[in-house]
Amino acid sequence: MATDIILSRIPDYIKSLKETRLSGLRPPQEFFNVQQISRPADLNQATTRISYNTRYFSGNYGLIVAVLAVYALLTNYWLLIALGFLFGGFAAINKWAPEPTQVGDYLVTQKSLYTALFVIGIPMLWIAAPLSTIFWIVGASAFLIVGHAALLEPGVESEYAAVQDSV
């Protein structure tokens, strides 16, 4: 029953995601404009560029983080198997074992099934090294985003951003 409620909310979530995050995507021609790439003169200029570009290209940077996360998950098979086992086991227990079941001399409850799931799943997750995957995503994202934001000169509209903020 809870999964039905969650599944019914997915289209609304996707619609709100499209309206909020994806509406902020800048076109690829603007994001990959090689004519605007230059080395910043000093740290102050680099900081100003990073500050402006991270706000201006926030949708594109979010997409980069999402793509890197999907890539990291698809290339770490152990993590994919461990997460599939844990989430699939959780969903299966909720769907097919809501009531205690008698198996031979034993009474199998949801609590005992969850215990077995976690006794098997947590060591699988530990072997899959999710923290190293998370740190890789954070490091790769930071390198790409800060590098792009520091090297890309803001457009003419950045000069008017301070005027709009003060009005």
Image: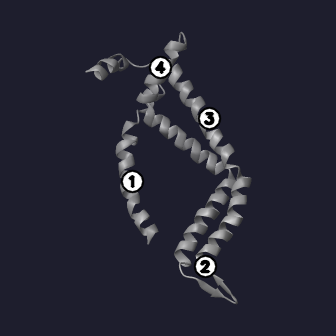
Labels 1 and 3: the sequence-earlier one: 1
Labels 4 and 2: the sequence-earlier one: 4
Labels 3 and 4: the sequence-earlier one: 4
**Residue 67 at x, y = what percent?**
55, 43
The residue at the point 59 percent across, 75 percent down is 110
Residue 140 — which label? 3
Q: Label 2: which residue?
A: 109
Name of the residue lying farthest toward the left: 167
From mark 2 to mark 3, how far is it between C-alphas?
44 Å
From mark 1 to mark 3, how far is it between C-alphas?
27 Å
The secondary element bearing badge 2 is classed as loop
The secondary element bearing badge 3 is classed as helix
**Residue 6 at x, y = what percent?**
43, 63
Q: Quadrant of residue 68?
A: top right
Q: In the rendered view, would you say 117 is above or below 68?
A: below
Q: Classify 10 Å Cα crowding around label 1: few (below 14), some (14-19), many (20 and above).
A: few
